[in-house]
Image: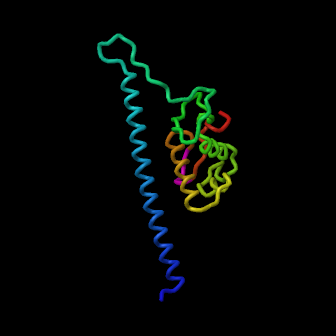
Amino acid sequence: MPSVMGLLEERERAARQRVEALQAELREAEAAWERFVIARETVAEVLMEPRRGERNPPVEVADERPARNTAAVPGSVVPHWRDGLDADVLAPDYQRIVDVLASGSGSDAGAMDCRQLAAALGLEAIAAKVEGVRSKAKRLAARGWLTEEKPGMFSTAAGRGAGS
């Protein structure tokens, strides 16, 4: 007859394997999503370039930036930061991350790791929540909203805080 500890260890091992598989699947899905974003941006750039010998103006491509009065909704795309773009174009979860970092409550001149960020956002410091925050912070850093000067330490980029 198996021991209780042995059964618990077996279930823990199975749960850990499932989490690792889901994290790998998430990384693959994010990589595919990033490729689509890059492809769309590349096509937009190509369409904006004038053709050789052509005098007609380039084709206009819709701006990915929502109108000033349009609030971002959960699940919306994180736009690349550019001058004049405020944090209010971000989905609420992303806005909260930028707000927490802009408040400067972390160590290292406002930099926070993902566990600190999760706690500051009122989330439990469990792996699933911390990984969710890490994913969002990495995406914000990749799009220019945050900086990651040291691996895993995030802070707001100069002039790109909640009030900009």
- Quadrant in which residue 18 is drawn: bottom left
- Name the residue rendered at 42%, 32% in the picture: 41
Q: Percent position (x, y) of residue 145?
A: 56, 39
Left or right, residue 11 beside residue 154: left
Question: Could you say which is closer to the camera, residue 151 or residue 141?
Answer: 141
The part of the chain drawn in magenta is 147-152
Query: Quick one: which residue is furthest to the top in this view?
Result: 55
Query: Quick one: which residue is furthest to the front in this view?
Result: 1
Left or right, residue 12 beside residue 46: right
- Name the residue rendered at 59%, 55% in the picture: 114
- Name the residue rendered at 64%, 52% in the picture: 108
Q: Percent position (x, y) of residue 42?
A: 38, 32
Specify how the rendered protein is coloured.
Answer: rainbow
- Quadrant in which residue 70 is drawn: top right
Q: Percent position (x, y) of residue 152?
A: 54, 54
Quadrant of the rendering where the C terminus is positioned: top right
Q: Is residue 102 magenta?
A: no
Q: How many marks overall?
A: 0
Tell me if residue 121 comes above or below residue 37 in the rendering: below
Tell me if residue 25 comes above or below residue 50 in the rendering: below
Question: Could you say which is closer to the camera, residue 62 or residue 148?
Answer: 62
- Name the residue rendered at 45%, 59% in the picture: 22
Q: Percent position (x, y) of residue 88?
A: 63, 34
Tell me if residue 58 comes above or below residue 162 in the rendering: above
